């Protein structure tokens, strides 16, 4: 097993539980809301988690939605995954959204609303060039390899100029 990464954590709410893994080997540490909230259908809210961290240089943390909340209540995150920079010392916040078209959702204090995944991130330098090296995919994307049958308009998902070329194929 690899050595754990040490991350300094501050509790901004003395009662908040330290983010924990639900099971050994899980990737995401559960984050809770320290504020009760109710979200109407389509409503979003920025919820506090009561913790701040100091990640080591070369790392970032990513706030991900929880699949259970998504499947059961239609709750996701507007900016999933949220990025926590190594230099950020403020409170980690979660921008939740209720995507259910009919039902409101209620959170109580200390309900688990998201999960935090800590990852190593590369240091990068961009080198500007006039032309990029070729590749098998080239500029194909956005469904260029075929879409879902129910998507209806299979020509909506190709690059500019390609839609007309592909009609009638
Ligand atoms: O879901 C999130 C996303 C971000 N943050 C915090 C940590 C992050 O380091 C900081 C800035 O986030 P981001 O770079 O996504 O925000 P921005 O809109 O680009 O703001 P800024 O101009 O402050 O970088 O806000 C959160 O607490 N939760």
Image (cartoon, rainbow, N blue to C red):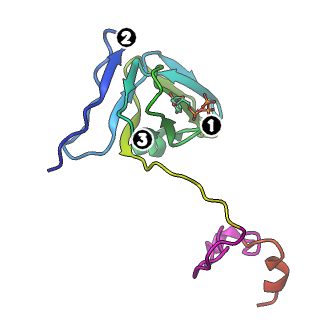
Report the number of numbered marks: 3
Residue 111 in sight from this viewpoint: no
Q: What residue is shown with label 1?
A: 102
How far apart are the alpha carbons under marks 1 and 2? 33 Å
Q: Where is residue 49 drawn, in percent x and y?
A: 43, 22
Where does residue 42 sit, x and y in percent of width and height? 65, 35
Write the start and end of the magenta stretch as one range. Answer: 130-157
Identity of the residue drawn at 40% across and 42% down = 68
Q: Is residue 144 magenta?
A: yes
- On the rendering, which quadrant does ligand 1 occupy? top right
Residue 150 placement (x, y as % from top left):
65, 70
User: Residue at the top extreme?
Assistant: 14
The reply to whether the magenta stretch includes residue 116 is no
Q: Examine the residues drawn in magenta and state their main secondary structure.
A: loop
Identify the secondary structure beneath mark 1.
loop
Q: Which mark is residue 13?
A: 2
Image quadrant in which you'd find residue 133: bottom right
Q: Nearer the viewer, mark 1 or mark 2?
A: 2
């Amino acid at each position: 097993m690899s050595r754990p990464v040490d991350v300094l954590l501050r509790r901004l709410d003395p009662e908040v539980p330290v983010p924990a893994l639900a099971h050994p080997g899980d990737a995401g540490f559960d984050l809770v809301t320290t504020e009760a909230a109710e979200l109407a259908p389509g409503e979003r809210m920025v919820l506090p988690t009561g913790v701040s961290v100091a990640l080591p240089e070369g790392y970032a943390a990513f706030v991900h939605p929880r699949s259970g909340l998504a499947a059961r209540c239609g709750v996701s995150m507007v900016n999933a995954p949220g990025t926590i920079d190594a230099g950020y010392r403020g409170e980690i916040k979660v921008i939740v959204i209720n995507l259910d078209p009919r039902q409101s959702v209620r959170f109580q204090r200390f309900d688990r609303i998201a999960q935090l995944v800590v990852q190593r991130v590369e240091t990068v330098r961009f080198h500007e060039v006039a032309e990029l090296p070729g590749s098998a995919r080239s500029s194909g994307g956005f469904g260029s390899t075929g879409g879902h049958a129910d998507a209806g308009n299979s020509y909506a998902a190709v690059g500019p100029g390609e839609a007309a070329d592909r009609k009638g194929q």
